[in-house]
Structure formats: structure tokens, C-alpha cells
Amino acid sequence: MPPGATALYTDHYELTMLQAAIAAGTAGRRSVFELFGRRLPEGRRYGVVAGVGRALEAIEQFRFDDETLAFLTDRGVVDERTCEHLAGYRFRGDIWGYPEGEVYFPYSPLMVVEGSFSDGVLLETVLLSILNHDSAIASAASRMTCAAGDRPCIEMGSRRTHEEAAVASARAAYVAGFSATSNLAAGRRYGVPTAGTSAHSFTLLHDSERHAFRAQVESLGRGTTLLVDTYDIAEAVRLGVEIAGPELGAVRIDSGDLGLLARDVRDQLDGLGATGTRIVVTSDLDEFAIAALSASPVDGYGVGTSLVTGSGAPTCGFVYKLVSREGPDGRMVDVAKKSRDKPSFGGRKHALRRRDTHGVAEAEVVGVGTPPDNDGDDRELLVPLVTSGEVVGHEPLEQARERHATSRGELPMPAHQMSRGEPVIATLHF
């Protein structure tokens, strides 16, 4: 992204707050903002942090260039004094946060943003936009890969969401264990493995299914995946093995009773000598459908709509609140919203994952003001992401993917159940 690309990924009132604070002489007050969620989607046992890398890129490009400033002044959004302030803006504070791929729970302090009020307030919308979306997708993806076990999941939801959301979704799904995506932009931009072969239109284009299969095998090789439910599945499987031989890579079923059809197709493939040919299923899958197919001879899943919409929870409900600010005497003062149904906890947060002697998570422990005690088995959760305005938290996507597998693996067994329940560990404040 070019400099200035993300400056207007913000809400109007961030700038009007800044203008009023500049006029009041409070814009430079030291401040601590916290990004967190008050709850998980109903029935979920844990969530997954994703989008951290994208958020850091956005912070690096958060600048107000001449064109952007002209837009703000022409629209009357800010006055000249504020415009002059924005012209020199770049985030100069510190950010600590949960690294990408980590699991989270209610009131986990996912990002702690420290700097002036001006530093922190302008980042609110862009950080919430990225983390609310990507974490929702990763949280759904994690449940799907958990249900799938060792069977690979492929992300196929590009045509069911906004074009840029599709790229971000593919990235988030990969962090949470998906093996590949159909989205080529995600492959180029983030290095996510891409996969795909053909749709029903390819079969319908040809004069017969035989002609279509032969064309695909001759072009893509015997290891290709043939879509077998355009007409008659049993006949298509027979044709596929006849044309490609027992080396046929896979067949894909996109409709019908997938469990029953998979068993019939497995029997047919084995009878034809294609014992190594895999069966991939698609068709409006979610984590519950994947779990229901666990006993079926399915070798892989393609997931679209449910994944890119968060499987019913398209946002995490994260919020971004001021929790501490400099007082008139220069000392930091804890502040908090006192609404009955939307409370927050004042004070700068520190967090660790309390684990037993076997490495199994027992609680999310949040210290207010000072770090909680670590008994040696616990794991610190907040890592430096930005130090004195310089991003220090960039990492390869593979590292986030590995972190997620490790983090999910240390959760108690109920975390892997698809049934509805409470967060698998409690969040404790000290």
C-alpha cells in the first residue's frame, strides 16, 4: 500500500474529537487504549486473533498526504490547525498485542496502544475494522479445521463476499489451518497456497462429459480433480477412471447427501482399482456439516459461504477504549466506561495464559497496572508490535499458522467440541 492509503479508513468523529482535543490542549496527553471483546459469539468456546499483520501494514501507511488533507478541509471535517497537525502525523507510540494465530477469550487485551491521545485515537477504526473481520473468519475457520482433523480444508468463498474481504478471508483461514485457497490475489499478496480445477460450466461447455473429462486430464494431468455431479455421479466416476486410469487424483461432489454419496463413490472407486483417488466434497459446508461427515470416506472439504461470513458470526464485537490517561499532575489515571451492559476495566493491562503442569490452559489471567504472577508453567501473551512508532511485530504467515495450532492444542478438550457452551477457560482480573 502507498503512504496515505489507510488514513481515511477511519470514522469522521475520530477527527472531530482530535480537533476539539487540540483546541482544549489535551491532544498530547499520554493515553492508553485497549482493544478487546466483551464476549464470544453465543455458544463459542474460544476465538482466534487474526489480521495483526494487516493491521501493522495499515499503521505503517497511516499518513495524511496533500490530497487527503485537501479532502478533509474541502468537506469541512477539520479546521486549519488540525489539518496542520495531521500533515505531520505518524504513530509514534508503542503497541503491545496478542500475536497472530493466538486464541482469545472475553476481555483478553488483544492490543494495548500507548502514546498521546492523538496517537491512539486515530487508529481506532482501522484497527477494529481489520481485527473484527479477520478474527471472525479465523475463529470460524479454526472450528472447521478442528472438525476436519487431518483432512484438509480449502477456502472457496471469494464469490460470496466483497473482493477485498475475500483476500483477507483467505489469509485468515490459512492462519487457522486451511491448507489452500481458490483466491489468486491471496496467493500473490500473502503467499497462501492456491488450488482449483474446474466448475460445472466446463463440463456443460463440451458436447459430452467424456469430452470434458478428457480435455481436463490431457491439460492438467491424471492427478487432477474431476467434478462428478453435473449429470449422473456413478457414470461420471466410471468415465473419470476410464479416462485417467487408477491414477486419477480426486473426484469432487458438490450436491446431494454428501455422506451417503461419498460412501457409494468410495466403493465404486475401489471396485475400479482407483483406491488412491481422493473424494473432495463441497456444497454449503460449515463446521457442523464437516463434523457430521467425520465417519464418511471424505478426504477433503471445500468451504465457501459459511467461512467468509464467520459461520454466523461475521464480526467479533471488538471495541477500542481509553483505559488510562495523563492527569493534570502528570500522573496516569485509570479511566473506564461504567455503562451497565457495556462495562470496561480501567488501567493498562498485562496478560498470561495460566497452564497446569501438563501444559493445558486453565485461565486467562489479566493483570491491571502490573503483570500477574507467573508460576513457571504460564505463558505471556502480549508481545511488542510497535516500539516508538516503529513496527517490530512483522512475521511470516507460517509462523502465525504454527502458533495457532500450538495455542489451540493447549486448550482443554471441550474446546474441540462443536456443541454450544461457555468459554472453555475463564478470564480472571487481578
Image: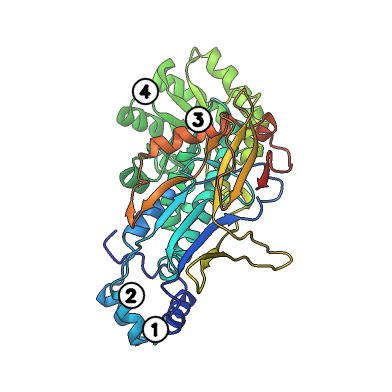
- Foreground mark, 4 or 2? 2
Q: How far apart are the two marked residues, 3 and 1, measured between alpha carbons?
A: 51 Å
* Secondary structure type for disc 3: loop
Q: For this view, does 409 lie left or right of residue 195?
A: right
CA distance for labels 2 and 1: 10 Å
Instruction: Provide residue 281's location: percent of width, then percent of height.
Output: 55, 33
Instruction: Answer few, some or many: residues within 10 Å of disc 2's Cα (few below 14, many 20 plus, some between 14 and 19).
Output: many
Tag 4 secondary structure: loop
**Sequence order check, earlier mark of 2 and 3:** 2
Task: Please report the residue visible at 42 percent of the width from the left and 57 percent of the height from the top.
Answer: 163
Report which residue position mark 2 lands on: 86
Can you tell which mark lies on residue 152? 3
Quick check: can you spot residue 229?
Answer: no
- Percent across and percent down for residue 39 are 66, 53
Q: Position of residue 107 (x, y in %)?
A: 62, 52
Q: Are marks 2 and 1 in contact (CB under 8 Å)?
A: yes
Three-letter amino acid code of the residue under disc 1 = Val
What amino acid does circle 2 point to?
A: Leu
Is 136 situated above or below 298? below
Q: Circle 4 sits on which residue? A: 222
Measure the alpha-carbon separation of dots 4 and 3. Answer: 20 Å
Residue under the image location 68 percent in, 39 percent down: 425
Which of discs 2 and 3 lies nearer the camera? The answer is 2
Circle nearer the N terminus (4, 2): 2
